[in-house]
Amino acid sequence: MVGSLVEPPLGRLRGVVRPVLFRAREKLPGVSRHQRDIADFDQAVARSGAFSSVEHHVVPWQRDVTIAEWILDLSSHSYVIAIALTERHTLLAEIEGVLEATFPDGAMSIPYQTRVLMAGRQRP
């Protein structure tokens, strides 16, 4: 059976993997996740007065990967690459251990969301 991040393992991953990643990011000046904070972006566009309509759509999708593929992808992130080699290997091994314990068959199904903001230009 394929493990799923939508099922109970999600809590474990958030509880273990995310803090490890956040610790890694904290060591790197200038690394931020603020670009993901888009909660009020559509309202800001609407308030600008430059657009006649603003629509926000969320498109859910799923990525099926092996643990090895996910670790390879994670190892290509700039904040991970910027970590000293020994510490980087330790970080990735720690995360891989959590994933292997959570998904013993090595398969993960990761839910994603693509957010789309569509705005019609205001006519003069």
Image (tube, grey):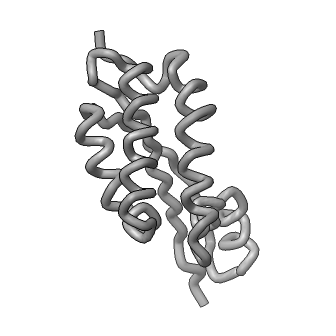
Q: Position of residue 6 (x, y in %)?
A: 49, 23
Please tell me which residue is depicted at 57% across the width and 62% down the height of the picture: 25
Q: Position of residue 38 (x, y in %)?
A: 64, 61
What is the residue that sits farthest to the right in this orientation?
A: 47
Q: Is residue 121 above or below residue 75?
A: below
Q: Is residue 123 above or below residue 73?
A: below
Q: Position of residue 85 (x, y in %)?
A: 36, 63
Please tell me which residue is depicted at 42% across the width and 67% down the height of the picture: 84
The residue closer to the viewer here, 64 or 15, is 15
Q: Position of residue 69 (x, y in %)?
A: 24, 41
The residue closer to the viewer here, 41 or 6, is 6
Q: Quadrant of the N terminus?
A: top left
Q: Is residue 8 above or below residue 23?
A: above
Q: Quadrant of the C terminus?
A: bottom right
Please tell me which residue is depicted at 51% across the width and 20% down the height of the picture: 9
What is the residue that sits farthest to the bottom in this orientation?
A: 124
On the picture, is 11 further left or further right than 99?
A: right
What is the residue that sits farthest to the front in this orientation?
A: 86
On the picture, is 104 further left or further right than 112?
A: left
Please tell me which residue is depicted at 31% across the width and 60% down the height of the picture: 76
What is the residue that sits farthest to the top in this orientation?
A: 1
> Which picture quadrant has residue 37?
bottom right
The residue closer to the viewer here, 74 or 61, is 74
The residue closer to the viewer here, 70 or 52, is 70
